[in-house]
Amino acid sequence: MKRGEKNSTIVRKKGKLIPVLLIVTAAVALLSVIVVFISMWIKRNSGNSYKELWAARNYSAVYEKSTNDIEKNPLDNSVLIYRGYAAFYIAVSENNPELALSYIDESIRCLRVALFEAKEKTVPQIKYMLGKAYFHKNIICSYHFYADLVVKYLQEALDAGYQADDIPELLGLSYGQLGMPYESIKSFSDALLVHESPFLLFNIAKEYYAQGQISAAKQYLFQVTSNAGDDILLIKSQNLLAKIYIDEEKYDDAKALYEQVLEKDDNCAETHYGLGVIYEKNGDLIKARSEWRKSLNIDSTYEDALKKVYR
């Protein structure tokens, strides 16, 4: 090959190599930009994952995030569970009853839908949360139409091996609302093994009283009245104990308890009604009717007092 031809071949090769290098360089640069962008996006959004938001107990953020995600896929099981749990905790902390009820209803809806496709290992926890949601709905609504569902889901969670310290207490209260005192006492007794409190002791006493086991009821009430640090619970216990004394015709003991209650709270309809009953038993109908009217002035719907005044 002649010298001129050789130089011409080298020039042509260099001419082809330069565009290739430019393309490779551009591709590498573009890839680098993409990698940096993805890294920045992951870093920026990693703190907004359900797991991290939940760990931070940012239930409002979890609920807001689920609102967007649920529109894309209404049956996303993971999103439904997070949304149901978040709605429950928002409802518990909400002071507006109507708003709280809307959140608790959304919690129940999400968790019931989630049950259809939930993994076997998460089903017991979902049922536990459903039981708690129905229990809270009873509180918000001030009636006990859902006590049977509280028992259903909490018992199924227990049967599946799920453990939570508040289950026995919630079951005890719900069984009591259903008029099942034996089951209620058993559940409250289980709760006492976890932690003893005047609240539990009072509820056990109340269930024993409902069964007619007066001696057992009094034993628990004595414990509450000697240890209760909460005035509201103490007043409830003293009123029930005074009622027992009236049943036993120990009117002086009952009156002494009622007077102790009125020293703490003169606006207790149950106490004024009870005093009226004592006066009635002692033949003083004028004072009796006066106490019953005081009871109705405090609570115009107090049924027992209404029957006494308007009989």
Image (cartoon, grey):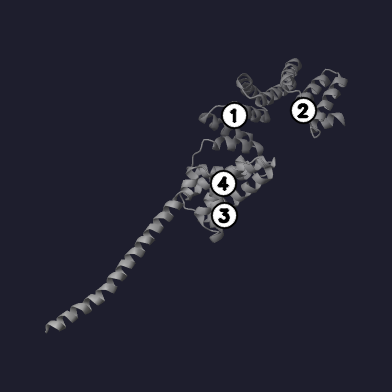
Label 3 vs label 2, nearer the camera: 3
Q: Which numbered tag is attached to residue 60?
A: 4
Nearest the viewer among 7 and 165 is: 7
At label 2, which amino acid type do we have?
A: Ala
User: Which is more N-terminal, label 2 or label 4?
Assistant: 4
Front label number (4 vs 2): 4
Disc 2 + disc 1, Cβ < 8 Å: no
- Residue 132 appears in the picture as rendered: yes
The residue wearing badge 2 is 269
Give the alpha-carbon distance from disc 4 to disc 3, as whole Å.
11 Å
Give the SS element for disc 2. helix
Question: Residue 48, percent across and down?
Answer: 48, 50
Q: Disc 3 designates what residue?
A: 67
Q: Is residue 239 left or right of residue 227?
A: right
- Please say if 241 is above or below 41: above
- For the point 64% across and 30% down, the residue is 207
Name the element at disc 1. helix
Front of the two marks 3 and 1: 3
How far apart marks 3 and 2 lie (CA) works out to 46 Å
Tell which circle, 4 or 3, labels the residue nearer the N-terminal end: 4
Counting residues from the start of the chain, the first of labels 4 and 1 encountered is 4
Image quadrant occupied by the N terminus:
bottom left
**Label 4 element class:** helix
- Residue labelled with disc 1: 200
Do the residues under discs 3 and 1 have CB atoms within 8 angstroms? no
The answer to whether mark 3 and mark 2 are in CB contact below 8 A is: no
* Left or right of 23 in this view: 43: right
Q: Which of marks 3 and 2 is nearer the N terminus?
A: 3
- State how far apart marks 4 and 1 are (Cα): 32 Å
